[in-house]
Image (cartoon, grey):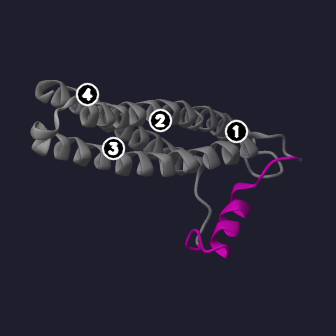
């Protein structure tokens, strides 16, 4: 398969479309993370309301710590989601027809000029895909941690209510 005028072969365009589709999954993970964070915060509120004032001590402090941890995890996960949303748009632009496409080498140069990436040779589409996949895995790990935090908060409050 020969490259087109921008230097991308059909395999690279296909990989760009795969990467765009995969990184778009970040939006769905963001929605799930929002729900998990809401569950943790709602559990914390429930704990404050359901546990009698005299018994609040450690259970409420633990729930507050879990809520704080959930906010930190959610914040990092949201940053990953924003980055994946950008990656989705970039990969889609790489996969367009040769007259409309964002050229990978030019994109890397623009990132270097903006100070967002060190100057150097253009990255391969494979390297770009591995980077997007790494971000997606990190986002999925954050979501898992949020769900675990929500479950732990519910169990902790339930055991101490």
Percent position (x, y) of residue 129?
54, 44
Q: Residue furthest right?
A: 99
Residue visible at 65% across and 41% down in the picture:
12
Q: Quadrant of the N terminus?
A: top right
Residue 42 image offset from top left, x and y in percent: 36, 32
Q: Secondary structure at mark 1?
A: helix
Please tell me in which quadrant of the rendered image residue 139 appears. top left
Of 129 and 12, which appears nearest the observer? 129
On screen, 16 above or below 107? Answer: above
Q: Is residue 155 magenta?
A: no
Mark 4 Cα shell of 10 Å, populated few (<14), some (14-19), many (≥20):
some
**Is 121 on the left-hand or right-hand side of 68?**
right
- Disc number placed over residue 151 in the picture, else none: 4
Circle nearer the N terminus (2, 1): 1
Q: Which residue is mark 3?
A: 70
Residue to which mark 2 is pinned:
34
Q: Which residue corresponds to the image point at 81% horizontal and 48% vertical from the top-left?
A: 101
Q: Earlier in the sequence, mark 4 or mark 2?
A: 2
Q: How far is the residue under mark 2 from the one under mark 3?
A: 10 Å
Q: Which residues are magenta?
A: 100-119
Comparing marks 4 and 1, which lies closer to the viewer? 4
Looking at the rendered structure, which numbered label has been put on residue 13? 1
- Look at the picture and state if 88 lies above or below 25: below
**Disc nearest the viewer among 3 and 1:** 3
Q: Label 3 to label 1, Cα distance in Å? A: 38 Å
**Residue 80 point in image, percent of width and height:** 49, 48
Q: Secondary structure at mark 4?
A: helix
- Residue at 30 percent across and 44 percent down: it is 67
Is residue 69 rendered to the left or right of residue 118?
A: left
Label 2 vs 3, first from the N-terminus: 2
Q: Earlier in the sequence, mark 3 or mark 1?
A: 1
Q: Nearer the viewer, residue 135 or 4?
A: 135
């Amino acid at each position: 398969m020969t490259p087109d005028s921008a230097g991308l072969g059909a395999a690279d365009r296909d990989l760009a479309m795969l990467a765009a589709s995969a990184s778009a999954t970040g939006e769905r993970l963001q929605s799930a993370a929002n729900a998990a964070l809401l569950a943790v915060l709602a559990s914390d509120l429930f704990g404050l309301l359901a546990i009698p004032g005299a018994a609040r001590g450690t259970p409420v402090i633990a729930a507050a710590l879990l809520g704080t941890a959930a906010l930190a995890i959610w914040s990092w996960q949201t940053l990953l989601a924003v980055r994946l949303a950008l990656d989705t748009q970039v990969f889609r632009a790489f996969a367009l027809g040769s007259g409309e496409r964002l050229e990978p080498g030019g994109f890397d140069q623009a990132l270097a000029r903006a100070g967002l990436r060190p100057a150097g040779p253009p990255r391969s589409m494979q390297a770009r895909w591995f980077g997007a996949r790494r971000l997606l895995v990190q986002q999925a790990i954050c979501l898992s941690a949020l769900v675990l935090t929500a479950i732990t908060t519910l169990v902790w409050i339930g055991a101490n209510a």
